Every structure is written in structure tokens, then in C-alpha cells.
Image: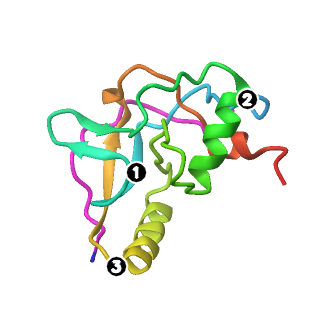
Amino acid sequence: MFTPRSSHRLPPTGPYDQATSSTSDATPKSIPPFVYRVHRNRAQTQYDFSTGFRAKNQTTIVNYNTVLSRFGLAHLNQQTNISSPFISVYVNQSHAEEVARYFATMYDEDTWVVTIDTKHLSRGPVFWAKNILEGQD
């Protein structure tokens, strides 16, 4: 089942310009007021209403580009033999809904699109997948 309704939606934080992100650095210069998480019950990322989303791997420190690249590519390729320190989200709600429909069919389980107000993100790095993938074959 795919549920396109969003939850936990709060007022926007202000303007967002995706063009300001650097192409040579995976860290964006700004983030949008909302991001969209495609979530399913068997995902490695866990969700609790009181604490929010939590990546399975809480011990890896992503402090070098090689670590970022290794874990980032494993995460993007859904390599389950490596616990990911990342939580995937999308900046485009309609794209997230397309992915949710695909996952609902592929994994045959309930799948949701959750709207996340980025004002409530805890401290920590944010990376653009497109920048992690730059230069990869």
C-alpha cells in the first residue's frame, strides 16, 4: 500500500535555492524548508514519533571524502552488507511519491511519504547524492 499523505507538516522556514549548492562539495550551502522521506517498515532507518528518524549506523564518522564516498555509494546502491549512517530524503515531493509507489510494489509492503520540516533536523552533515556520485562510473 502506498500512502501519499504527508505527516508532521509544519510551516516553511523560508526561501530555498537549489542552485546555491556547490558541485565540488557534497555538502549543500542551504537546504530546502521541507524534504520528503520514503519510508517502509522494513527499512534500515527506524522511526519513532518522539525522536524522529534514526540511521542504523550511528558510529561511523563521515570526516573524509573517502569515507563519504564509500558509505554514500553503498547507501545509494542499497548494499545491505554495510550499515548506512545516512537517511535518504528527496527535495521533490512528486519524485518521492513515484519512488514510494515503486517501493510499495517492489517490496510488497506499506510505504509512506513523510514530510520533514528541516528546522527540526538534528545537528550533523547533509549531503547531496548527485555530488557524491560525481565522477563515478
Image spot of residue 3 (x, y percent): 26, 70
Looking at marks 1 and 2 on the same chain, the residue that comes earlier in the sequence is marked by 1
Residue at (29% x, 46% y) in the render: 46
Q: Amino acid at mark 1?
A: Tyr
Looking at marks 1 and 3 on the same chain, the residue that comes earlier in the sequence is marked by 1
Q: Is residue 23 left or right of residue 36?
A: right
Q: Is residue 33 left or right of residue 67?
A: left
Is residue 19 visible in this depiction of the protein?
Answer: no
Separation of disc 1 and disc 2 at Cα?
A: 27 Å
First to last magenta residue range: 2-21
- When the figure is inspected, residue 4 is found, relative to residue 82, above or below; the finding is below
Q: Is residue 88 left or right of residue 68?
A: left
Q: Nearer the viewer, residue 62 or 17?
A: 62
- When the figure is inspected, residue 81 is found, relative to residue 66, above or below; the finding is below
Residue at (40% x, 80% y) in the render: 105
- Label 3 crowd (10 A; few <14 / some 14-19 / many >=20): few
Q: Nearer the viewer, residue 83 or 107?
A: 83
- Label 2 crowd (10 A; few <14 / some 14-19 / many >=20): few
Image spot of residue 114 (x, y percent): 30, 53
Question: Comparing marks 1 and 2, which lies closer to the viewer?
Answer: 2
Q: Main secondary structure of the magenta part?
A: loop
Q: Secondary structure at mark 1?
A: strand
- When the figure is inspected, residue 65 is found, relative to residue 73, above or below; the finding is above
Residue at (38% x, 40% y) in the render: 56
Q: Secondary structure at mark 3?
A: loop
User: Looking at this rendering, what residue extends furthest in the front direction?
Assistant: 81
Question: Comparing marks 1 and 3, which lies closer to the viewer?
Answer: 3
Q: Which residue has dot 3 on it?
A: 108
Q: Quadrant of residue 82?
A: top right
Which circle marks residue 66 in the picture? 2
| Label 3 close to label 2 by CB (< 8 Å) | no
Looking at marks 3 and 2 on the same chain, the residue that comes earlier in the sequence is marked by 2
